[in-house]
Structure formats: structure tokens, C-alpha cells
Amino acid sequence: MENIKNQWNNYFEKIINKYNLSISRNNPIVIFVDGRNVTRDISYNLNDETKNSFNDTMEKTVKYFTKELKCKAISGVDEVSFIIEDVILLAKKMKIGKKYKSQEIVSIFSQHFFDYFNKLNTEKKIYWHCKCQTIPKGKVNSYIKYRSVIIFNSFTTYFLKKNLIKNPGKIKEEKRLELCNNNIAYKQIKEYEFGSLFFNGDRIDLNEYFKGNIVKIDKERKIRDNYLDLNNI
């Protein structure tokens, strides 16, 4: 009986480990988080940049975690990618342990993120998808550019969909941007179209960052009553 038990223990242990990869502590780790069904939920307007909006809550949450983990993050629409170069600090802050297993990192971090966001969230509770990966050293900026382009596509597509344009995801990028720029409401949120970049608790200028400069952006959000209601455009 002991031999049979060991046989099955080894068999299932191998399966578990196959999908629970070890994460290197020597390379940057990316933790990607995105809202579950948020873009489909009509109770949220992801074009709204006022106080206590989804975007305001997201920014506060991202600022908190980038300060805690001394890392960068690129965020837009309903997603954020945390680029963490100090993996040991991540393990210490999140109490992950020394094995740096992907499932444990995703599980623990997503719970911290869920808890912090929904304490600030004034609307209904939001759940999150989460995954992680390592990237090579020296590829942090490349990754930020990569996610920024994806955010741009999601941002313009969502805006047009919110403004009742049929099948915006099938419209070519150039035409999609033209349609957005022709809408007065888009001009108010255009600065967010390639995402917002954060570093050590501050939002910083994305374009200046790629020039090698760290320029903080400190922008006060307006109260919704004094803001153009993008839901009614």
C-alpha cells in the first residue's frame, strides 16, 4: 500500500508542479491584473476621470502598490501591469515565501489587490483576473511600450463602443483614432489613450520616461457634477 501511495503522490505532484512554475528572483517579474467583465458592465464608465470613478480608484490602488513594491506599473482601461524588479521585496511584502511559485504569487497578490481596490470602490465589488511572468533584464521599457499599444487599442475601441459605434474592434487603427479625435469628449481624456505610467507611488509622464526623464504628474480630479457626462454623449 505504501508503494501505491508514493506512486500516486509522485504522479499528481508532477502535474501540480507543471502548472506552478518557479519564478526567477534575478529577473523582473510582471504581475498583470485586469477587471472581470468590467468593460461589459454598464454601471461603470471607463471614460470617466472624475473623483471616485473607477479610474480614480484604480489610480489610487496602483499608486499604493507601486510605492509598497518600489516598482513601475502601466495601467489603462481596466488593466494594470506591475513591473517588479525587486522580487525579494515582493516576497517579503506579500509574505509569499522563498520558493517564488507562480500560483502562489498570483493567488496572494490578487487577494491584496482585490482587498485594497474594493475598500476604496464606491460602486459594486469588482473581481480580477491575475497572472505573472518574468521578463529579461533590460526589457522593462520594451514591455511598457508593448502594453501601452494594447491599452491604446482597448481604450479607443471602448470609447467608440460607449459612443454607440458598431463593431469598433474591427475598425482599422487609423480610422478608429480619427473617429475618436473627432469627438469633443475624447479630447478631455486623450492624455490617457496610451495608458498611465506609475513609479514608486507617483504617476509620471509616459513620453518623458522614454526620453530618460522622470516627470511627475500631479493632477487634481474634478467632481462629477462639474464634468461632462460621457454616458450621455
Image (cartoon, rainbow, N blue to C red):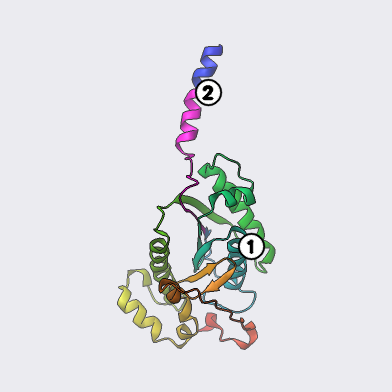
From the viewer's perspective, is 186 left or right of 177? right
Residue drawn 56% across and 84% down?
229
Q: Residues within 10 Å of mark 2 (few under 14, many from 20)?
A: few
**Nearer to us in this view, 135 or 58:** 135
Residue drawn 46% across and 85% down?
187
How far across and how far down the image is residue 214, in percent?
Answer: 50, 73
Task: Identify residue for label 2.
Answer: 9
Position of 88 relative to 40 (above/below): above
Give me the disc on residue 88: none
From the viewer's perspective, is 224 left or right of 132? right
Task: Identify residue for label 1.
Answer: 117
Residue 79 in sight: no
Q: Secondary structure at mark 1?
A: helix
Instruction: Give the residue furthest to the right.
Output: 119
How far across and how far down the image is residue 83, in percent?
Answer: 49, 58
Residue drawn 53% across and 68% down?
198
- The magenta-colored residue range is 10-33
Q: Residues within 10 Å of mark 1 (few under 14, many from 20)?
A: many
